[in-house]
Image: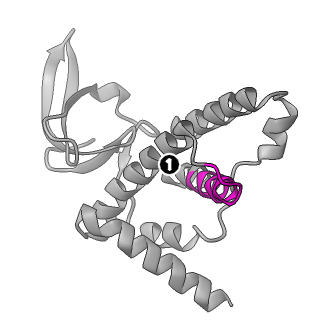
Amino acid sequence: MHSPGDIVVYRHHVCKIAAVREAYFEGKDYLELHALFENALKLFVAADEAAPPALRPVMTRERALALIDSIADADPIDESKLRSKASTPTLLERRLKEEYDKRLKTFQPEDLLPIMKSVHERTVRREDAGRRITATDKKYFDLAEGLLCDELSVALGIPRDKVRDFLVERVKDAERRRR
């Protein structure tokens, strides 16, 4: 059971359990969650529905570091499979969006990496061709990066605004060691 003061991840929101409300609504117990990185966001979750994957503990420091170290080897989303189902660029964008959404709905930080890796590779290809990032790619990259950085901030005990720099340096170090 969860207790007030516990830090958890509900869906993708890093939250502190503010209270356990007994018989709060329709006779059910509810957890009152306060998001750490979204001011004034309060969530009420039925205690009997507060289970993985929707609600889980924040990853450990060790798991966070292992996740960061796996970024360089993470596979992007396989666009060739999506291309076979899409006859036009518009349909490909729609299939990519569906794939991004599918990975977000697992509520697992590991599933954010393929989104970020795919968007990065697509953006590099587009820039090399003289084009800009698509609105869909920008939206999903920003979302995935923000969600990942929120949890990593808590897991690693570093300020949220320092996580991106930490990620970049750690990934660069891992790539140097591999060479």
Question: Which SS type dominates the magenta stretch?
Answer: helix
Residue 121 drawn in magenta: yes
Which residue is more in the foreground, 56 or 86?
Answer: 86
Residue ID at (68%, 90%): 179
Q: Using the rendered image of the protein, determine whether residue 107 is visible from the camera's viewpoint.
A: no
Vertical comparison of 51 with 119: above or below: above
Q: Is residue 162 left or right of residue 84?
A: left
Residue 171 position (above or below residue 135): below
- Name the amino acid, label 1: Phe
Give the residue number, with chain letter if any, for mark 1: 141
Crowding at dot 1, Cα within 10 Å, few <14 / some 14-19 / many 20+, comes out as many
Q: Nearer the viewer, residue 52 or 126?
A: 126
Q: Would you say 149 lies left or right of 175 here?
A: left
Asked if residue 87 lies left or right of residue 101, the reply is right
Q: Position of residue 129 (x, y in %)?
A: 71, 55
Q: Residue at x 82, y 37 (%)?
A: 83
Q: Position of residue 174 (x, y in %)?
A: 56, 83
**Residue range highlighted in magenta:** 116-131
Task: Tell me the colour scheme of the image.
Answer: one colour
Residue at the far right in the pictured view: 84
The reply to whether the magenta stretch includes residue 158 is no
Residue 21 image position (x, y, % from top left): 13, 27
Residue at the image position 37 percent from the left and 73 percent from the top: 165
Percent position (x, y) of residue 86? 81, 29
Specify whether 60 is left or right of 25: right
